[in-house]
Amino acid sequence: MNTQTENKDLFAPVTALKGVGTKTAEALSSLGINSIYDLLFYFPFRYDELEPLPLDQIMDGQKVLLKGTVVTEPFVSRFGYKKSRLSFKIQIDHDIVMVNFFNQPWLKDKLELGKDVAVYGKYNVARQSLSAFKFIAEKKSDSGLAAIYPLNRHVRQKKLQELIDQAIKEYLPQVDNVVPEDIRKKYRLETDQAIVQDMHHPKNAAMAKVAKRSAIFREFFLFQIQLAQMMSMRDDDAPGEAKKYDLAAIKELIAKLPFELSDDQKKVVNEIFADLHSPRQMRRLLQGDVGAGKTVVAVFAIYAVITAGYQAALMVPTEILAEQHFAKIDELLRPLGVRVALLTGDTKDLEKKEIYQELADGMINVVIGTHALIQDSVQFKNLGLAIIDEQHRFGVNQRNKLISKGKNPDILAMTATPIPRTLALTVYGEMAVSSIRHLPKGRKPIISSWVTSNKLRDVLVQMQSQLDQGFQIYVVTPLIRESEKSDLKNAEDLHAKLARFFKKENVVLLHGQMSGQEKNDIMDAFANKKIDILVTTSVIEVGVDVANANMMVIFNAERFGLSQLHQLRGRIGRGKTQSYCVFVSDPPNEVGKQRMEIITNTSDGFKLAEEDLKLRGEGDVFGKAQSGLPQFKVGDVVNDYNTLVTAQKEARDLIKQNKDLTGKQYQFLKDVLKYNKELQND
């Protein structure tokens, strides 16, 4: 088939196309289109029907194509700043239809009396008029479908279509196949050339459907091949070391626990111990609902590797969480002779030097810290276990930097954001997944409610009742990014209003722009019951335990994902008393209302994550800006889940049989994988 030299042009920059200069290339790059290959495989997200319907079959408000003869002179009227309306009438058989184009006055030059035209728009039955979007009189279409592409303000639909057509004409013969022939035949999939041709220019809806099914499999297959290769390399390069832990010492830890492990915790501890005992490197993700007891499971893993003669490290995203983990782990392991250290950005320089020295000497058994753990100064004598908590908050490079500080240490990633199996399969395809689904015994379920902002007075009364009983309250307001000044202003305004209403109470504001020391001081004061109402942003989402805080009010709840709301809610309900969470929200649409009803009526984080995935898509489950999630362009991990599973099986089987993809038929697949890898590394 094609050689690598021939394929080289296919991955050339878009500037290789005639008429594409630096400015157009930059505009295309904003869509993720950098090469000819990207352009060919940039597919439409829907198609407009371009088959005209008889007028008596058109529903009111329906988008349709009308073909007729211009019977009046086109007239442009202007209103408002830079606003215009181009109007003319067309005759369709014996009917006359008024056509209006808004803010496209230049189309007047394309219209003349007696000329046949085709226009696409929204039809108004009562007025027998069309609010037109597109003038397609000169379109020589080979089908009754028009491809509609995802765009932004930098690129126009027509320009993109022209460039794709140019690329198809000049480069399509160089496109070979990513999915091997035997797999294509098995699942009746199109070749890559047919996918490109039929996705951009389907002759009918059935052809578009077949092409899309093939394109979805192709996209998933490429992703799963990368994962399978990664797993294969790790199995070869990082066999790991079997940890011969002391079972008698583990039993002593169990005896000293002030509570009994839940069945889920016991099951997960056994899974981890089996991994530690194996000569293969452990790569396990532990996901558990908020407050399900993941830290205790981590303590067992840490203590096991320490009894086997190794050190452990636990990296967390925030200093507050690091301090909390340190307090809990030190309390459980110090009586057993374990040296536990805390290392964060706030650790004093002299103390840091001591910790660096004692880690290198092996005197410190386990260190808990933030990004401070991945500094070059941190060296271990014998790191055997790397634990990464809330691991989706760290980039791949940050995780790898910690792991590289040991000789193939076992890896335990933890998250309190339950991930649907659909997502776990794609994001953590190379990891074994353990789940703690049930909360510890004796916990009362949190009573959740949703109110609109006009019922705020009722919420304030409920808050006063809780305060009168001696309880504390979290009030949460959105601050999605640290730079959003308007959000910070909202938090400050809310704090001022609540302070005026609750004059006798100590109402304090906590937000992400404060220094680490300020945050810690405020959280310490809250934990010690010196603060009655803590007005805060989502900075408290992870890991803060204050048993006496048994009410939370979340403002503008529609701005959070379901999983994030569930995380926030999990900060209360830590004691034995009844807890309450109130979502204050004025959802702008039906989906928003649906989300509020789901979060109010569901306390299972795994179910919520599935619902969030269905409502918002896989790229948005963890909030606005989380790393590590694949963004599929054609496929959808919820609706196309079966295809995803099939693609994973075929990819793994292929890599098992032919790890290096040796053979001429795999050359194009290797070229595409290489190109994708280069893009990811940019």
Image: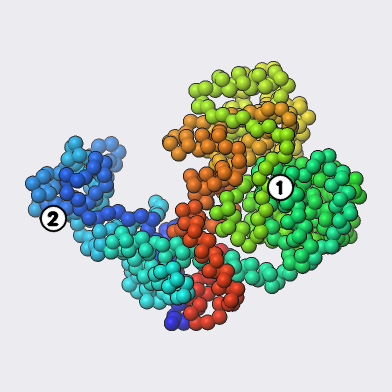
Counting other residues with Cα less than 10 Å from the Cα at mark 1, is it few (<14), some (14-19), or many (20 or more)?
some
Horizontal and vertical percent position of residue 19: 35, 67
**Pointer 2: what residue?**
116
Element on which disc 1 rests? helix
- Quick one: which residue is furthest to the front in this view? 263
Left or right for 397, reference 86? right
Residue 254 in sight here: yes
Q: Is residue 109 at all visible to an observer of this figure?
A: no
Q: Looking at this view, is 46 or 74 the one in front?
A: 46
Q: Amino acid at mark 2?
A: Asp
Quadrant where the C terminus is found in the figure: bottom right
Apparent side of residue 533 relative to residue 95 in the rendered image (left or right): right
Mark nearest the camera among 1 and 2 is 1
Check disc 2 and report its element: helix, strand or loop.
Answer: strand
Measured from the top left, where is residue 538 in percent x and y?
A: 62, 38
Residue sitting nearer the eye, 34 or 231 = 231
| Residue 264 circle label | 1
Which residue is painted at 34% across and 66% down in the image?
198
Residue 238 location in percent, x, y?
A: 72, 69
Give the amino acid at mark 1.
Answer: Asp
Dot label at residue 573: none
Query: How many numbered circles does the render carry?
Result: 2
Q: Tell me the quarter of the picture where residue 460 sits.
A: top right
- Give the side of residue 599 with respect to residue 323, left or right: left
